[in-house]
Amino acid sequence: MRVLLLGCNHRTATVSVRERLAFGPRERSSALEAFKQSWPGAEAVLLSTCNRSELYVARPLHKTPRVGDLIEFLGKFSQTPAHEFVSSLYHYEDSDALRHLFRVVSSLDSLVVGESQIIKQAKDALDAATQVGTAGKTFQSIFQMALSCAKQVHAQTGIGAGKVSVGSVAVDYALKIFSRLDDKTVLMIGAGEMGQLTLQYLLQFKPARTVIVNRTRSRAEEVAESIGAEVGDFERLADHIAAADVVISCTGSPEPLLSARDFEPIPANRRYKPLLIIDIAVPRDFDPAIAGARNVYLCNVDDLHEAVEQTIESRRQQIRTSEAMIDQAVNQLLYKQSQQRDLGPTIHALEQKIRDLGHQELAWLLPKLTGDKERDADLIKQFHHRLLSKIMHHPSKSLTQQASNGQLGLYAQVLREIFDLHDEAL
């Protein structure tokens, strides 16, 4: 199987492009269903996060889809003309695609190197593809090895120690605007995993008041109860923003939560006190136009790069060690795939060889059978002896030759394993 990867990430595409190519759980399932209908002989896994959208494809040699087909496929489901995003795409094939996947899952390609959330996101992507039926034996094996490698990287290098989530870097950004948070009101919009990770870090700085707002109130209540936060009504979102000092937003909304017009009265309602909005959602939760409002500071995931670069600099050694581990894991996978490609034809050739010998000996036997039981029994014994002799002729000859080359022990051990020969029977 050929492995292809087509995608974009925070390095190659702006957030405005990434949000067009973002796939929520429902859109991902629909896209994979359509992929299966178009290319039933291929496999596909779609990995879409706030920092990347990547389509992994495995297909038979010389078959479709090809890169052009995948570009058209992404354009169709994002409802975006290809010329608006194609320059932001990268594509890799075979070993390069595998190495990229292993780096992604190990978080070496993340906005914040060492963050562990990508491991769960990759597993979720595999599970979603498995449920739809686009992840078969090829991707089950590849992704499981990538996930295993990622866990080893995190366990053995310490690359995930310290501040390694987008949320934690976002909080650091807040501390650059406000020298303290213990007298501030923090509003978290969204009650998903990213929001919870951010809040866990944020609560260390003991904000005076923390409010959670979510479209599904019961979900907000569940999270708020576990951390001692308040719950706000989503219908009063503008009021909650006006009462906050720091807003961290990460929802799955396909459209901005507030238009620039709806946001316009908020700065005056809060008497133009500084308001920091950290929009870590893709697609973005806030219209970029509100950044022009008085004393409103709006940043998105792309604005966090400076803090991220500092994190990367402190992890240079861990990155080098992780890269070496990934190279070793990918090489093991490639070797395994190479051996599997060689093994199939070898087993088939062995079966055909024995089958041909059987047919040859049957062709010798059948015309000689007369119905005379004693004579036919003797012929069958001869048939049995002739067939076994021909099957064993070449292996016996090879073993004799290897004895003179000093390789007999290795060949003999291989035969014992293959044919389940026990020492006491030899």
Image (cartoon, rainbow, N blue to C red):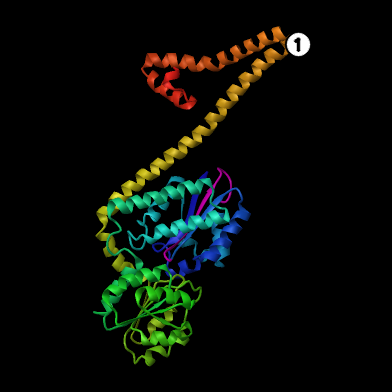
| Above-or-below relation of 221 to 363 | below
Residue tagged 1: 371
Residue 232, position in %: x, y?
42, 83
| Three-letter code, disc 1 | Gly
Residue 93, position in %: x, y?
47, 48
Nearer the observer, 39 or 333? 333
Nearer the observer, 348 or 66? 348
Nearer the observer, 278 or 207? 207
The residue drawn where x is 48% and y is 84% is: 235
How many discs appear?
1
| Above-or-below relation of 361 to 331 | above
Callout 1: SS: loop
Q: Is residue 270 magenta?
A: no
The residue drawn where x is 57% and y is 30% is: 348
Is 235 left or right of 185, judged from the image as shown? right
Quarter placement of the C terminus: top left
Nearer the observer, 238 or 77? 238
Residue stretch in magenta: 50-67
The residue drawn where x is 61% and y is 50% is: 40
The residue drawn where x is 51% and y is 66% is: 24
* Residue closest to the far front: 424
Splitting the image into 4 quarters, where does residue 80 fall?
Answer: bottom right
Is there any visible trace of residue 190 in the rendered image?
Answer: no
* Residue closest to the far right: 371
| Above-or-below relation of 81 to 386 | below
Q: Is residue 61 magenta?
A: yes
Label 1 packing within 10 angstroms: few (<14), some (14-19), many (20+): few
Is 307 left or right of 45, judged from the image as shown? left
Residue 249, position in %: x, y?
40, 75
Is there any visible trace of residue 106 in the rendered image?
Answer: yes
Is 11 left or right of 364, judged from the image as shown? left
